[in-house]
Image (cartoon, rainbow, N blue to C red):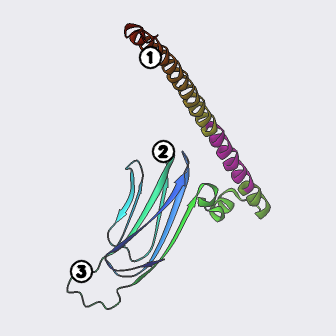
């Protein structure tokens, strides 16, 4: 990702509840390159003002949220640096992808086939959790839709009843008016 001077770029990524997140940043730049990782609720996971080379940030989310990774490139006035352009490598892994499978294989003394089965099990668990989340969200949206539909229905019914009542009142008023004027 290219990053110009005095510029900040932010990348957003949705992460479910209790999910392991690994963010790997590799900056080809100077000491004034910064990085900040927050979420939309204001929780700050990492902040660095001077990144040179590689940096890895690992954390677990406490609530479903959108993670915001902001990278900045600062060049101070009067600096003799002619390279005002930075190259940044950013890798965001979450859930099963964030685990270091080589370490798990060594620690548990597993064969490669068993590691692949563990990966597939983790991915299938993530898919099941996401399906459950989508079902809950769909139920909430359906409830909102039904309550809104009821409100609109009763509003329309009340509006029609008030129009009929106003029409009847107007007919009665006009009838009395014309009877007083002896036109009827």
Q: Residue at x 50, y 64 (%)?
A: 23
The residue tagged 2 is 62
Q: CB atoms at circles 3 and 1 under 8 Å apart?
A: no
Distance from Cα at disc 1 to Cα at disc 2? 63 Å
Distance from Cα at disc 3 to Cα at disc 2? 37 Å
| Nearest the eye: 27 or 177 | 177
Question: Which-is-in-front pick, marks 1 and 2?
Answer: 1
Q: CB atoms at circles 3 and 2 under 8 Å apart?
A: no
Residue with the most extreme right position: 113
* Corner quadrant of residue 103: bottom right
Which tag, 1 or 2, sits closer to the chain's start? 2
| Nearest the eye: 111 or 122 | 122
Distance from Cα at disc 3 to Cα at disc 1? 77 Å
19 vs 86, left or right, is right
Q: The residue tagged with tag 1: helix, strand or loop? A: helix
| Nearest the eye: 138 or 119 | 138
Question: Which-is-in-front pick, marks 3 and 2?
Answer: 3
The residue tagged 3 is 76
Residue 6 in percent (x, y) is at 31, 76
The residue tagged 1 is 170
Please tell me whether residue 35 is drawn above or below residue 173 in the rendered image: below
| Nearest the eye: 33 or 183 | 183
Residue with the most extreme left position: 78
- Is the residue marked by circle 2 packed among few (<14), some (14-19), or many (20+) residues within 10 Å? few
Which tag, 3 or 2, sits closer to the chain's start? 2
Q: Main secondary structure of the magenta part?
A: helix
- Is the residue marked by circle 1 packed among few (<14), some (14-19), or many (20+) residues within 10 Å? few
Please tell me whether residue 138 is drawn above or below residue 175 in the rendered image: below
| Region rendered in magenta | 120-136
Q: Residue at x 65, y 44 (%)?
A: 129
């Amino acid at each position: 990702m290219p990053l110009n001077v005095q510029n900040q770029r932010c990348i957003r990524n949705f992460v479910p509840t209790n999910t392991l997140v690994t963010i790997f940043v590799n900056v080809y730049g100077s000491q004034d390159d910064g990085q900040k990782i927050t979420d939309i609720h204001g929780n700050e996971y990492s902040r660095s003002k001077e990144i040179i080379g590689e940096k890895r940030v690992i954390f677990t989310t406490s609530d479903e949220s959108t993670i915001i990774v902001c990278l900045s490139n600062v060049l101070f006035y009067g600096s003799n640096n002619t390279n005002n352009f930075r190259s940044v490598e950013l890798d965001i892994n979450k859930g099963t992808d964030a685990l270091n499978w080589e370490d798990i294989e060594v620690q548990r003394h597993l064969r490669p086939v068993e590691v692949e089965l563990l990966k597939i099990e983790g991915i299938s668990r993530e898919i099941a959790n996401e399906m459950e989340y989508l079902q809950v969200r769909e139920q909430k949206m359906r409830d909102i839709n039904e309550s809104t539909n009821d409100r609109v229905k009763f509003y329309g019914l009340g509006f029609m009843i008030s129009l009929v009542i106003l029409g009847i009142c107007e007919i009665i008023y006009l009838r009395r008016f014309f009877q007083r004027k002896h036109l009827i």
